[in-house]
Image (cartoon, rainbow, N blue to C red):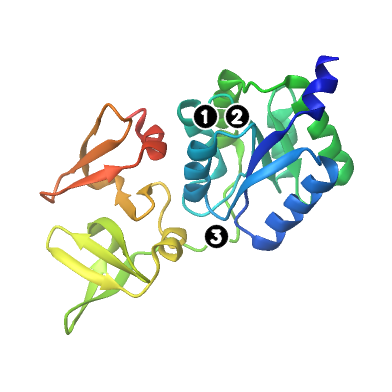
């Protein structure tokens, strides 16, 4: 009776997949396999997924493991703080590694391309588990996946230099010298110890070209160089403030992104 009731009630989800066609295909499959499921947000990158999960706190999160900027693994790790009751289903193209890592776990996964039979089985398991996520199991799996997943072979090397403008001057800026990037309409402001310059690249496109181990998005409009951070403080609302080594101003970390600094 309990499983039947869980299957019939309204469920909610957030779907995060950076490839638009694959994201739409997954949403379409979900509508077919799980009519009671309401998809509250469809996200094309990890940062927007993290914000959507913090806002909606859905029953389920379908997360592509590899996304530009914040990966699905980083988003899942942040759920321990932002939405611990959310169940996670990882979406991956890494067949061998996924099977090995998930074999004895309580967290589900889907292989690309999504097969209807596999999705139907996943839906049944989610409904059987109810509406409570397993934070301990999720944290253990995220750590394991981070250790075993291979690097992307199609990934281009991260940016080393930037060409930006400051008034009539064109500057060549070493990426390692950047303290942070700030969104400025369709452009991006590059901030270094020496000053500011303007880059003709939207911040979302820039994020995909930066080294994800060094640069992290801490707000919808801000990417920070982790090496430039002197300290992190948290206020009563859950938001954070970053103090920089080479700049007098501080940077706001929105509440969903504070989980990224848990171990700093």
Q: Which residue is mark 3?
A: 155
Quadrant placement of the C terminus: top left
Which residue: 52% across, 44% down? 52
Residue positioned 81% across, 29% down in the render: 8
Q: Residue furthest top?
A: 1
Image disc number at residue 86: 2
Where is residue 74? Give x, y as percent.
50, 39
Task: Give yes or no for contact between labels 2 and 1 (Cβ–Cβ under 8 Å).
Answer: yes
Q: Looking at the image, which residue is at 57% across and 55% down?
A: 44
| CA–CA distance in space, label 2 to label 3 | 30 Å
Q: Are marks 3 and 1 in contact (CB under 8 Å)?
A: no
Q: Residue 22: x percent and y percent?
A: 71, 57
Report the front residue among 87 and 54: 54
Q: Residue at x 37, y 36 (%)?
A: 255
- Looking at the rendered image, the quarter that the N terminus falls into is top right
Dot label at residue 259: none
- Give the crowd class for mark 2: few <14, some 14-19, many >=20 residues within 10 Å: many
| Marks 2 and 3, the one that precedes in the sequence | 2
Q: Which residue is mark 1?
A: 83
Q: CA distance from mark 3 to mark 1?
A: 31 Å
Side of 22 relative to 232 (left or right)? right
Q: Place residue 250 in its image quadrant.
A: top left
Is residue 62 in view?
no
């Amino acid at each position: 009776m309990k499983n039947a009731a869980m299957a019939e009630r309204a469920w909610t989800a957030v779907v995060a997949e950076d490839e638009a066609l694959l994201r739409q295909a997954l949403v379409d499959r979900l509508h077919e396999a799980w009519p009671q499921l309401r998809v509250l947000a469809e996200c094309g990158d990890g940062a927007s997924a993290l914000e959507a999960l913090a806002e909606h706190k859905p029953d389920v999160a379908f997360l592509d493991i590899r996304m530009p900027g914040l990966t699905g693994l980083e988003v899942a790790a942040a759920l321990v703080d932002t939405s611990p009751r959310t169940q996670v289903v990882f979406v991956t193209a890494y067949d061998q590694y996924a099977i090995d890592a998930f074999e004895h776990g309580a967290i589900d996964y889907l292989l690309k391309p999504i097969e209807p039979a596999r999705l139907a089985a996943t839906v049944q398991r989610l409904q059987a588990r109810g509406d409570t996520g397993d934070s301990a199991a999720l944290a253990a799996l995220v750590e394991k996946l981070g250790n075993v997943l291979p690097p992307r072979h199609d990934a281009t090397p991260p940016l080393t230099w930037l060409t930006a403008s400051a008034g009539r001057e064109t500057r060549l800026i070493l990426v390692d010298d950047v303290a942070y990037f700030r969104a400025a309409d369709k452009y991006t402001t590059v901030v270094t110890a020496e000053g500011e310059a303007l880059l003709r690249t939207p911040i979302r496109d820039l994020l995909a070209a930066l080294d994800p181990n060094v640069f992290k998005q801490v707000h919808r409009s801000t990417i920070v160089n982790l090496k430039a951070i002197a300290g992190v403080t948290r206020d009563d609302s859950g938001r954070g403030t970053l103090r920089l080594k080479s700049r007098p101003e501080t940077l706001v970390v929105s509440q969903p992104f504070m989980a990224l600094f848990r171990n700093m």
